[in-house]
Amino acid sequence: MDLENQQRVKDLTEKHGKENLVVILGGAEAEASGLACETVTNGDPTFAGPLAGVQLGLACYHILEPEIKDEVDPEVYDEQVSMMEMVLDVDEIVDEVSTYRDKYSEFS
Amino acid sequence: MLKGKKVIILGDRDGVPGPAIEECIKSAGAEVVFTTTECFV
C-alpha cells in the first residue's frame, strides 16, 4: 500500500475509532491483497510507511468475499463487480485476505 | 456487519476500482469515509 494511503488509514482510524471502521480491498492479486490486509491489521511489513510497527487490527475484507457480497444489493454487485469476479482468482484472494484477517484483525 | 460502519476503500486499477466498490458499500448501508484506486503492484 502506498505511503500516502497508509497515513490516511492511520488518520481515519484516529478520527473514527478502530471499532467503527472496515477496510474493503479491490486488489486484483491475492498476494498484494494479503499484503494490504496485513498492513491495516498488523502494520506495514516492509517497514517503509507510517503504519510500520502500528498494529491497527482493523476489520479488513476483499469485496469478493462472501461476507461482503451477501450484504450488497445484488443488482449493484452484478453491475459493478461481477465482471471482475469472473476473471480474478476469487478463491486464492479470499484465502489470502482471510488468513491475515483471522491472524491479526481485532474486529473480524 | 457493514450497516452503520465507516468504510475505507482501497480499490485497484487492475482489479475492482474504488468507485465500483463504493457503490456496493453504500447499498449495504455503510458510510464511505475514503475511497482510492491504487495500483497494487
Image (cartoon, rainbow, N blue to C red):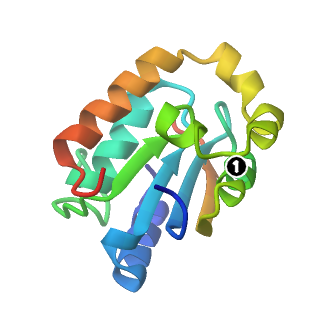
- How many numbered tags mark residues here? 1
Left or right of residue B32, residue A84 in this image: right
Between residue A40 and residue A24, name the one nearer to us: A24
Residue at the (37%, 74%) spot, across then down = A13
Which percent across, then down, holds residue A40?
Answer: 33, 55
Q: Chain of mark 1?
A: B
| Left or right placement of residue A24 versus residue A78 in this view | left
Question: On the image, which quarter does residue B22 sit in?
Answer: bottom right
Q: As displayed, is residue A19 above or below residue A11?
A: above
Which residue sits at x=70%, y=60%? B26
Q: Position of residue A59 (x, y in %)?
A: 35, 54
The one nearer the camera, A106 or B9, is A106
Q: Is residue A106 left or right of residue A76?
A: left
**Looking at the picture, does residue B31 appear above or below residue A35?**
below
Residue A47 seen in this snapshot: no
Say whether residue B30 is left or right of residue A37: right
Secondary structure of the residue carrying tag 1 is: helix
The three-letter code of the residue at mark 1 reads: Cys
How dense is the environment of label 1, judged by Cα within 10 Å: few (below 14), some, or many (20 and up)?
Answer: many
Q: Identify which residue is drawn at 24% across, 51% down.
A: A105
Q: Is residue A61 visible?
A: yes
Q: In the image shown, does A32 or A57 lie closer to the viewer?
A: A57
Going by the picture, which residue comes out furthest to the bottom? Answer: A15
Percent across and percent down for residue A8 are 46, 71
Taking depth in this image into account, of B20 and A9 the one nearest to the observer is B20
Residue identifier under label 1: B24
| Residue shown at the point (23%, 45%) measured from the top left | A45
x then y, percent, for residue A19: 32, 70
